[in-house]
Image (tube, helix red, strand yellow):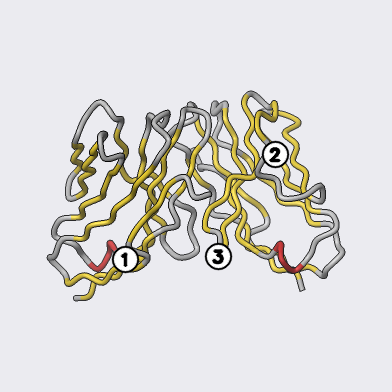
Amino acid sequence: QQQVKQSPQSLIVQKGGISIINCAYENTAFDYFPWYQQFPGKGPALLIAIRPDVSEKKEGRFTISFNKSAKQFSLHIMDSQPGDSATYFCAASTGNQFYFGTGTSLTVIP
Amino acid sequence: DAGVIQSPRHEVTEMGQEVTLRCKPISGHDYLFWYRQTMMRGLELLIYFNNNVPIDDSGMPEDRFSAKMPNASFSTLKIQPSEPRDSAVYFCASSLYPTEAFFGQGTRLTVV
């Protein structure tokens, strides 16, 4: 059973546009929600993370929006750039285990 | 710090052979994780250690898989005997806390 459901599977965005990736979870014990970015041939790298006591966290062009009541969180990439083209994974953690989404392949076209 | 170091980067082996993947975590990190990544199943946690002790190995697919962490700076994941369906990218990750895991570059395993 997939603990974290991620959508869409793939996304194509024009340069300068906004990329939005969504995740949903069921386990209310999750208390940490990171997003990872993975480039081909590389391991996933932590991009940004949020805890459920805040509804939004912003770091540069990357923003996590968190809706605790809906058990959903999303990643917004503002002013998307071709260099943002990668696979993005959401994850949820109970503090001793990570559960990853299935990933979203983002392509930003010039 | 050089980050999490995995070796080899690529491994091609014949079905039935033993495969050993190696990982050097970031110094000072208490947690070490082994993940497997495939197109079909995404990232799967296989096992994780805390202070060199295996905490949860429920993700290990079969008895053919085993993992050890003899000291704080080294871990191995062994598959014996290997099968074609074990072909995947295997990642090692470490963290100071069970959050914010730092991943290695992975080992791409191909079993023919």
Q: Residue at x 41, y 32 (%)?
A: A30
Identified by mark 1, the residue type is Leu
Q: Which mark is residue B75?
A: 2
User: Toward which corner of the image does residue B53 lie, by quadrant?
Assistant: top right
Q: CA distance from mark 2 to mark 3?
A: 26 Å
Closer to us: B78 or B105:
B78
Q: Which mark is residue A47?
A: none
Q: Chain of mark 1?
A: A
Q: Going from the N terminus, do you reach mark 2 or mark 3 first?
A: 3
Q: Secondary structure at mark 1?
A: strand
Check disc 3 and report the residue beneath it. Answer: B40
Identified by mark 3, the residue type is Met
Q: Chain of mark 2?
A: B
Left or right, A103 with respect to A69, comes to: right
Q: Is residue A59 above or below residue B55?
A: below
Check disc 1 and report the residue beneath it. Answer: A106
Q: Chain of mark 3?
A: B
Left or right, B110 with respect to A64, comes to: right
Identified by mark 2, the residue type is Ser
Q: Is residue B36 above or below residue A86?
A: above
Closer to us: A69 or B92:
A69
Q: Horizontal and vertical percent for residue A38?
A: 41, 57
Q: CB of mark 3 within 8 Å of CB of mark 1?
A: no
Q: Residue at x 66, y 28 (%)?
A: B55
Image quarter hosting the C terminus of chain B: bottom right
Q: CB of mark 1 within 8 Å of CB of mark 2?
A: no
Q: Horizontal and vertical percent for residue B31?
A: 57, 30
Q: Is residue A23 above or below residue A68?
A: below
Q: Residue at x 26, y 40 (%)?
A: A70
